[in-house]
Structures are given as C-alpha cells and as structure tokens.
C-alpha cells in the first residue's frame, strides 16, 4: 500500500513537470514531421512514417527515463524531504520501489499517449494498422522500464549528471551486447577469452526488445517473444533494484 | 505586479528572438558558402560502413536507413536531371541496406541505378545477391537480378535467377516464361518490354516507375530506329546517298509516315553511316559522356599537375579505355576553356538543342 502511495505521488510529481508535456509535444512534432517528409520517400511513405514514428516514441521515452529517473531520488535527498518521508513507517526498499514504479507509470503514460497518436496516424492516414504496431509500442515500453531501473540504480549510487551519463552508456552498450559477445568469442582461447565472455554476459541485451523493424515490415511478432522479453526485462529490473536497494539502505541520508 | 512580470517576460522573449534572428541573418552568407562547398556527393562519399554504423545506432538503424534513403533519392533526382553520373550510388545503397537489410525496395532501386545508370553491373549484382541472402522469401530480388543479367546479355545467369524467382512465386506465369526466353537466348526487345512492364507492375517506388517508363519509351525508340535504318538502307541503294531526314523516306515512298519520337524529340539519320538515333537519347548520351570525360580530365590534372594535351593522352595514360564516339560525335579538349566539348560531323545538328531534360521531361 505504501509502495503504491509513493508511486502515485511520484507519478503526480513527474506529470506536473514541464519536461513531461514538452516530451509529448516534441514526439507529436516528430511523428507529424515524418508525414511531412514522406512524400519525398518515393513510394516508401508507409515505411518512413512508421520507422520515424516508432523511433520518435523510443527516443523521447529514453530521454524521459534517463533524465526524470536520475533526478527524482536525488532531488528529494537535496531538499531533505526524504528524511521526513522515511521518518514515517516506510522502509527504504519500499520507498525505492515506489519511486521506480512511479517513473514506470509516467513512462507508460507517455508511451501510451505517443503510441495512441502513432496508431491513429497509421490507421487513418496510412490505413495499414496491424497488431505488430501495438506489439512494437509495448516492447518500447518494456525497454523503457528496464532503462528506468538503471537510472534509479545510478541515481542512488552517483550524482544526477553522472547517473544520466552511466544510464545512457548502459543503454548504448546494451544495444551492442550481441556484438560484444561475438567479439569476446573471437579472442584467442584462454583465461582472457573466458573472462571477456563472462563480462559480456553481464550486459543486458536491449536488442531483444527492438521489434520496430519487424512491425514495420509486417513480420509476425509472436506472443512467445513478448512473454520472453517481458520475463527477461523483469529479471533485469529485479537485479537492478536489488543492488539499488542494498546501496540505498546503507546510505547516510543525514 | 503580475502584469509587470508578464510584460518583462514578453519583452525578454522578444529581445531574445530578435537577437537570434539578427545573428542568423548575419551568419547566413557564411553558412550558405559552407553548404555550397560541402556537396551532397561529398556527404555521401564519407558515409561510414553500414556494418559499423548499425550497432552504433542503438536500435534506431531503420530510421537512420530512411534518412539515408531520402538522401539517396535526392542524389538520384539531382543527377538524373543533370550529368547522369552516379558514381556514389553503389556505396550509398550498400550502407543503406547494411542498416536495414530487409529494405527490399532499396535493393531493387539501388541495383537499377547502379547497373543501368552508373553502368557498374558487378556492384548492382552484388547488391541484389546480398538482398537475396537477407530476404530469401522475396521473389522480386532474384527476378530483378535475372532481369539485369538478361539486359547485359548474360542469359545463363538470367535463366537461373528467373527459375529461382518462379519457384518463389509460382502463380506468376510471366516469370516462368522469362526463364524460358533466357534459356533459349531469345526474346530481344519484346522480352525486355515485357520484363520492364513486370517491374512497373511490381514496384511502389515512383522513381523506379519513372525509370521503367523511360526504358519502355527507349524500347519503342529502338524499334523505330531499326525500321528507319532499314528504310534508310533501301534509300541509299536507290539513290546512292543516305537521306538527310526521316521525312525524305516518306517522300520516297519507303515509309507511310515518320514514327513520332517517344520522348517528344525527333529521329536523326547520320549522312555518312546511315545510323539512326533518337535525338533525345543521343543528346543524353553525349551529355553523360561530356561529364565523365571532364571528371577524367580533372583527375589527370590533379595527378600530373598539368592539363592533358588532348583526350588521346587520357587513353595513353590508361585513365580511359577509349574515347566514345556515339553517332560519330567527336569529343575534344577546348584549349581556351580547358573543358571537354563535343562536335557533330553531321552539319546543322546541335546536340544541345534537345527540348527535354535527361529524364525526358520538357525543359522550362
């Protein structure tokens, strides 16, 4: 119950933030802009509008997950409101999970708003709406939930600026995970390769959530893939929040 | 108090926007000069490898490929209207399809530009073969590869890829028939026409459609020139000289009427060889040759630090295989301007008088 209260409070706080409204406006401009440039695409209007539309939803979502996520906990520590909050019967772990869920709700709201705009455009303008488009938006949401868990983790262990940088770096490396594993397997056999391969397997594989291309080309996105990706995301989120909560519990807030 | 604050905000916004406007006006000439110096070709030439770019795009590679697609279309449009030189096309479409390996239209259109316009069949074939590997279920890619092999006279390869396309799309009877054409090494203009019509039917790309429509007009022109050349030979047998114009063939009773040139131009007959050409297609070929020769001359100047004495020196220096001479047109290096010029042995024919651009559209 307390977790839910913190989450709802966080949602209220973030949606009041101008960054939230600005991000939706910016995404609307990007999605609308893709329609404006599509006549230049020589018969590929459909693809261009969908690619740019989905990329805009993902990019704005990542921006929000990073910049809102890393500053929330830190802001309360700076304002000292966290001390008052934690003086109430609420555990630090509950507080952190509540904060995280609040951010996820914000991201879900944002993705739903941008996704609805995108789906309306695909349905009424392109007339090629398919279940794959909804699946792609869902997967963007799942990836954003993972990124939000990184930003909460880094907000606890470092400053907002560094936390943002670390989260973006992990987002970037997460999309390179498969290539990193390939490079590691190409090293000469020995302890170095074993270590590199083990380290490579510690990286989250964010490409697993990228089904934007499949949705645009109308390739089937099975329920199995969605379930696997969701379960995988839950695992990453739990491990990130576990570390975050351990660090946060030991942190001196006075 | 609140009104004062609002006025202060509005004023600061106004000052800020005015300052921004003024600054942009101030830097506009420099920005324009910089933009002019960095041409689209330079930008395209420096695109890094798509294989390297894709992992760095962090899941946004499809959107990146779309941006590159828009630039590629712009590049094609610009060169189609001007010099018909497409030397960056193979690189651009390679990068584009590395970023988005399922972008079938990019393979199809890219191969058309690279094989037909850039005259680099090997790169075009490689692009389509990559497309087939990435999209083995799509029949259009082996069809296009077979089609390009067919147009290049490589009937064995054409038959093999037509058969592959027919296996992937057994409902399309035309594809199986094309395989038979290629196997028997027959078909000529009729088969080419049917294949271009198939391309026209299966593409959504407007530029691709325009190219296919132009190719169909070219086939019509090829049929007309064959008939006109035959009549011109009969005219020479009768009079000892070739006719000065196609109208002379009608007056001599060798033709019922002069066929209309499909691009809206006219047909010309060479007074010495009797070769018949569409003035539009000839002017387009000459324009392209002039641009290519000019590029080779510039490369010679850069390498040797001086201008070549004449165009033959480019052949001696192995920078050029041979100097082209379509319809007996002679190319030469103009000492005064330093540029490559063309002259026609046929009196009274100005190759620059074509009323249409290289894309077949009426010039403004």
Image (spheres, coloured by chain):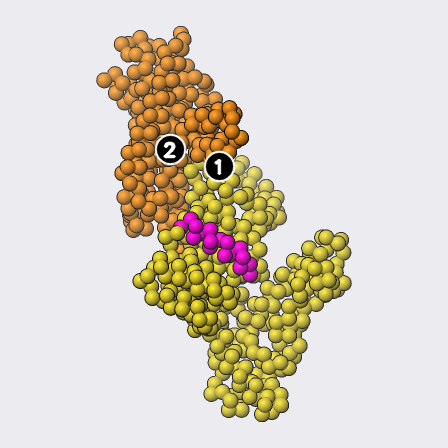
Chain colours: A orange, B yellow
Is residue B242 in view from this perspective?
A: yes
The chain letter for the residue carrying disc 1 is B
**Foreground: A191 or B108?**
A191
Residue lying farthest to the front in this orientation = A189
The quarter in which the N terminus of chain B is drawn is top left
Could you tell me what secondary structure mostly forms the magenta stretch?
helix
Pointer 2 local density, CA inside 10 Å: few below 14, some 14–19, many at least 20: many
* Residue occupied by mark 2: A61
Residue segment shown in magenta: B119-135
Pointer 1 local density, CA inside 10 Å: few below 14, some 14–19, many at least 20: some
Which SS class for mark 2? helix
**Foreground: A242 or A164?**
A242
The residues tagged by marks 1 and 2 sit, at their Cα atoms, a distance apart of 19 Å
Q: Position of residue B225 (x, y in %)?
A: 52, 78
Is residue A108 in view from this perspective?
A: no
The residue at 58%/67% (across/down) is B285
- Residue B133 inside the magenta-drawn segment: yes
* Relative height, residue B237 to residue A167 (above, below): below
Q: Is residue A8 left or right of residue B160?
A: left
Total of numbered circles in the picture? Answer: 2
Q: Position of residue B207 (x, y in %)?
A: 45, 59
* Residue A115 image-quadrant placement: top left
Task: State whether discs 1 and 2 lie on one chain.
Answer: no
């Amino acid at each position: 119950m307390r977790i839910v209260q913190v989450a709802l409070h966080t949602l209220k706080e973030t949606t009041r933030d101008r960054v939230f409204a600005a991000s939706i406006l910016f995404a609307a401009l990007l999605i609308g802009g893709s329609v404006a440039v599509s006549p230049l695409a020589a018969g590929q209007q459909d693809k261009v509008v969908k690619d740019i539309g989905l990329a805009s939803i993902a990019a704005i979502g990542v921006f929000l997950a990073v910049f809102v996520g890393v500053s929330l906990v830190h802001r309360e520590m700076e304002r000292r409101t966290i001390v008052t909050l934690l003086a109430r019967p609420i555990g630090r772990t509950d507080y952190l999970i509540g904060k995280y869920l609040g951010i996820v709700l914000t991201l879900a709201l944002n993705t739903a708003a941008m996704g609805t705009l995108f789906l309306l455009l695909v349905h009424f303008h392109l007339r090629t709406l398919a279940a794959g488009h909804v699946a792609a938006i869902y997967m963007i949401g799942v990836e954003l939930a993972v990124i939000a868990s990184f930003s909460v983790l880094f907000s606890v262990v470092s400053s907002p600026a560094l936390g943002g940088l670390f989260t973006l770096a992990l987002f970037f490396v997460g999309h390179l995970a498969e290539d990193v594993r390939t490079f590691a397997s190409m090293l000469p056999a020995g302890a170095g390769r074993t270590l590199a391969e083990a380290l490579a397997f510690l990286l989250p594989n964010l490409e697993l959530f990228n089904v934007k291309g499949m949705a645009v080309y109308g390739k089937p996105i099975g329920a199995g893939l969605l379930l696997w990706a969701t379960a995988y995301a839950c695992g990453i989120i739990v491990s990130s929040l576990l570390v975050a909560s351990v660090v946060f519990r030991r942190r001196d807030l006075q | 108090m609140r009104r004062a604050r609002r006025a202060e905000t509005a004023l600061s916004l106004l000052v800020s926007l005015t300052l921004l406007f003024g600054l942009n006006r101030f830097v506009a000439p420099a920005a324009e000069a910089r933009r002019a110096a960095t041409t689209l070709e330079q930008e395209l030439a420096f695109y890094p490898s798509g294989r390297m770019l894709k992992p760095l795009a962090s899941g946004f590679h499809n959107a990146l490929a779309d941006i590159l697609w828009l630039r590629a279309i712009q590049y094609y449009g610009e060169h189609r209207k001007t010099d018909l030189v497409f030397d960056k096309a193979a690189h651009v479409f390679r990068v584009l399809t590395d970023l988005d390996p399922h972008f079938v239209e990019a393979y199809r259109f890219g191969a058309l530009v690279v094989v037909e316009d850039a005259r680099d069949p090997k790169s075009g074939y490689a692009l389509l073969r990559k497309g087939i590997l990435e999209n083995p279920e799509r029949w259009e890619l082996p069809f296009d590869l077979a089609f390009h092999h067919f147009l290049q006279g490589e009937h064995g390869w054409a038959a093999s890829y037509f058969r592959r396309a027919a296996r992937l799309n057994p409902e399309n009877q035309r594809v199986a028939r094309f395989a038979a054409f290629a196997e028997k090494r027959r078909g000529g203009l009729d088969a080419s026409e049917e294949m271009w019509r198939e391309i026209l039917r299966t593409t959504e790309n407007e530029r691709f459609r325009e190219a296919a429509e132009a190719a169909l007009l070219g086939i019509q022109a090829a049929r007309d020139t064959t008939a006109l050349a035959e009549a011109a030979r009969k005219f020479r047998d009768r009079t000892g000289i070739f006719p000065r114009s196609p109208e002379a063939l009608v007056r001599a009773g060798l033709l019922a009427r002069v066929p209309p040139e499909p691009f809206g131009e006219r047909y010309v007959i060479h007074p010495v060889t009797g070769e018949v050409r569409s003035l539009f297609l000839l002017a387009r070929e000459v324009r392209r040759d002039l641009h290519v020769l000019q590029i080779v001359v510039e490369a010679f100047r850069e390498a040797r630090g001086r201008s070549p004495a004449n165009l033959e020196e480019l052949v001696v220096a192995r920078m050029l295989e041979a100097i082209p001479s379509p319809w007996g047109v002679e190319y030469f290096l103009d000492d005064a301007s330093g540029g490559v010029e063309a002259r026609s042995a046929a009196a009274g024919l100005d190759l620059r008088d074509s009323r249409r651009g290289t894309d077949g559209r009426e010039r403004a």
